[in-house]
Image (cartoon, rainbow, N blue to C red):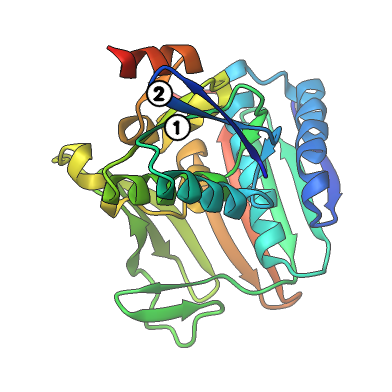
Amino acid sequence: MPGESFKKFVFTNNADALYPLSVDIIDHLKQQVSPDEAAIQKLRMVLIELLTNAIKHSGNNETIIEVSTTAHSINLKKTDQGNTFAFTTDGVKLEWPLPGNHHMGRVVSIYGDNNCTLKGNLENNWSINFFIEEHADTEAMDNAITSLPEHFGLMIITKACDNFTYKFDIDTCTNNFIATINTVTSN
Amino acid sequence: MILTTNTNKNALIANVEAKEANLTVADNLKEELVALIDKGNKFIVVNFENVVYVDSSFLGALVSSLKYAIANQADIVIAGLNKDIFALFQLIRLDKAFKIFTTADEAAASKAL
């Protein structure tokens, strides 16, 4: 099918390899689907944050970046066997895979500021789909700086992507972050 | 040291010397900016003109430093962003938290007015 491609890249979780790998992946995508400048800018942001996340959380194991394209989208899948995804919401630590079925369908807040909140839809025990909830009524930023978060990685990826999901694969015990950027805008 | 400094009018220009402003230098940025504020500098221009990209860790350190500056009646402004880094600031609305200037000279001139 036109536009369809797949290639696997290996990241050694070494900071020195971060930028060169992001350039290699973008060069590969330029050859496959000729993304426009806006899509390339988003790809750079997403790749840098996915690889930064790998350095922080994947331990000594290598990280696999699968890059695939369709006629309408670019998909980046980061897979590792490091620490599973975890965060604290409303004083409760959620760690994947989630125990029990009672979380399914819940929407949880991860972090945010006066402008927006990064939230996640708990699709099932294994996956969470990230989204941004914008706040209509924002305070003056002068008063809001002290409440700004100091962690932006997931928010950057969620905002730069059209879809961003984490899935824990129980069979392979791997963490999978999957980011999709649409290359064709639907009306 | 990832910052080199020089004065320009009433501003202290702090030039980020790392081309890759990522998690390997984020702690250094915070420590060095805090030290500059502790020395009494009230208007610091963080100049990114040598920086190719920034990651979320570096941005977190920058925000943390801004909070420290405000608590100490100081200010940190930004200059020299390339178009990708400026777009990143806009994406997460840090362009509302920081005053952003095209060049360090322009930022220094704003303080001199």
Q: Is residue A99 visible?
A: yes
Left or right: where A157 falls relative to B4: left
Q: Residues within 10 Å of mark 1 (few under 14, many from 20)?
A: many
How many angstroms separate mark 2 from mark 1 (CA)?
10 Å
**Residue A142 location (% of width, % of height):** 21, 39
Q: Mark 2, chain letter?
A: B
Crowding at mark 2 (Cα within 10 Å: few <14, some 14-19, many 20+): many
Residue A184 x %, y %: 56, 23
Labelled disc at residue B89 = 1
Q: Chain of mark 1?
A: B
Q: Which mark is residue A182?
A: none
Residue A104: where, in percent of width, then height? Answer: 40, 74
Quadrant of the drawing holding the N terminus of chain A = top right
SS for dot 1: helix
Residue at the spot 26% in from the left edge and 43% down from the top edge = B73
Do we see residue A5 in this rendering?
Answer: no
- Circle 2 sits in a helix, a strand or a loop, which is it? strand
Give the residue at mark 2: B100
- Asked if both marks, 2 and 1, belong to the same chain, the answer given is yes
